[in-house]
Image (cartoon, grey):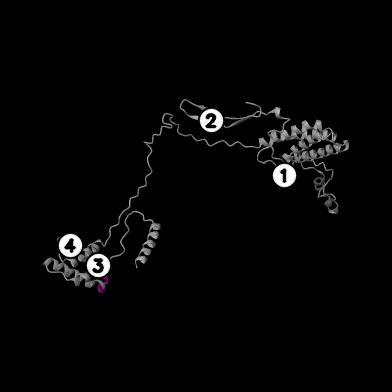
């Protein structure tokens, strides 16, 4: 490790049964004391620091500029600028002192309880008197939430600011510069300590087989497959549809086959069930299909009038057939083809 490095490590143990355990993450920080007098590394690429982190660095920059301008300005102006830097250092020190509960150095005394002391009714109120003139250091609201290590380092930072302020007030900016650098370095270290290390979730992956790595063997890699089993429901009026085809053939050819009698018999049963519920609509069709069946059995020619009456009754029974699985049709293609054929027909007309 080099100065300025941070080491994150943990301890892992394995027993004879290959049971593994590991400790928490430990951090070792090696401070870089050689960079104490350097501003390098104190500025981040993204401005994430509050304003008071920039103030100490600004005091250093102005102190160095004052030392460069020492030979070109008057002694009075040099002292005024040095004293003003000392005032700025004091304001910054007081700002940090609030984190440690230090007293106000303004010299003024303000308390809202002074007006109550002038009331004659509070003449013998000892609690009010103590409340006005007592500092409540043990109040829970005044307690800080800083850790002891952070408090000690912040106290050390205030000490460096005290020393820097003393040199600036006595017009010795060259001697104040090392204390300013030390205060800035301590502030930067406090900022870095506020970071929190969050370890990754303990997740064990399957060890890789180096012999198969990058071999390109995809024999055991299966292609994704989506399979659905669609149950086709039987059409209760299938016999009526078949009977319509038989009747159309009889209308055109006039000859029958042996298998048609069975089809017409099933269609007759369907018409009988509907005729019971609605005799006005289906009774004539039942009579016509029975007559057609008798003519086929006796070998007589079938009347086309009976065929038409029977077809009308069978067509009343039928509804829209159920959809069967088929290839998808792109609606966009139909929308393009329909205007195309419409325009062709207009040209021929």
Predominant SS of the magenta segment: helix
Quadrant location, the C terminus: bottom left
Res. 84 image quadrant: top right
Q: Position of residue 248 (x, y in %)?
A: 21, 66
* Secondary structure at numbered mark 4: helix
Give the mark, 2 or 3, whose residue is nearer the N terminus.
Answer: 2
The stretch in magenta equals 270-280
For the residues bearing labels 2 and 3, Cβ distance under 8 angstroms: no
- Label 2 – label 3 distance at C-alpha: 82 Å
Q: Which residue is mark 1?
A: 141
Residue 227's disc number:
none
Q: Is residue 108 above or below residue 237?
A: above
Give the mark, 1 or 4, whose residue is nearer the N terminus.
Answer: 1
Q: Position of residue 68 (x, y in %)?
A: 80, 34
For the residues bearing labels 2 and 1, Cβ distance under 8 angstroms: no
Mark 2 or 4: in front is 4
- The answer to if 278 sits in the magenta stretch is yes
Residue 314's disc number:
3
Q: Nearer the viewer, residue 326 or 53?
A: 326
- Label 1 – label 4 distance at C-alpha: 102 Å
Mark 1 or 4: in front is 4
Q: Which residue is mark 4?
A: 260
- Label 1 – label 3 distance at C-alpha: 93 Å
Q: Nearer the viewer, residue 24 or 340?
A: 340
Give the mark, 2 or 1, whose residue is nearer the N terminus.
Answer: 2
């Amino acid at each position: 490790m080099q100065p300025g490095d941070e080491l994150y490590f943990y301890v892992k143990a394995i027993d004879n049964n290959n049971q593994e355990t590991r400790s928490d993450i430990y951090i070792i920080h090696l401070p870089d004391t050689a960079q104490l007098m350097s501003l390098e590394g104190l500025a981040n690429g993204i401005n994430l620091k509050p304003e008071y982190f920039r103030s100490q660095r600004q005091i250093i920059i102005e102190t160095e500029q004052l030392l460069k301008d020492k030979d070109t300005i008057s002694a009075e102006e040099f002292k005024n600028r040095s004293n003003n830097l000392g005032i700025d250092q004091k304001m910054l020190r007081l700002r940090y002192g609030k984190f440690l509960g230090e007293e106000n150095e303004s010299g003024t005394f303000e308390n809202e309880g002074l007006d109550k002391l002038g009331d004659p009714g509070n003449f013998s109120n000892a609690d009010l008197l103590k409340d006005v003139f007592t500092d409540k250091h043990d109040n829970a609201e005044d307690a800080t939430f800083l850790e002891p290590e952070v408090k000690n380092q912040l106290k050390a930072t205030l000490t460096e600011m005290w020393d820097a302020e003393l040199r600036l007030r006595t017009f010795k900016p060259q001697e104040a510069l090392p204390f300013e650098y030390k205060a800035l370095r301590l502030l930067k270290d406090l900022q870095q300590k506020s970071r929190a290390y969050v370890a990754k979730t303990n997740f064990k992956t399957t060890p890789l087989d180096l012999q198969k790595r990058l071999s390109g063997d995809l024999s055991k890699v299966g292609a994704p497959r989506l399979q659905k089993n669609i149950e086709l429901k039987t059409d209760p009026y299938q016999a009526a549809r078949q009977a319509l085809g038989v009747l159309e053939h009889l209308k055109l050819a006039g000859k029958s086959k042996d298998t048609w009698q069975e089809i017409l018999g099933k269609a007759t049963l369907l018409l009988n069930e509907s005729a019971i519920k609605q005799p006005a609509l289906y009774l004539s069709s039942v009579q016509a299909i029975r007559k057609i069946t008798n003519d086929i059995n006796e070998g007589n020619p079938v009347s086309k009038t009976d065929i038409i009456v029977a077809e009308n009754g069978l067509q009343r029974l039928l509804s829209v057939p159920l959809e069967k699985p088929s290839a998808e049709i792109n609606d966009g293609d139909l929308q393009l083809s329909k205007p195309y054929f419409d325009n062709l027909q207009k040209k021929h007309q």
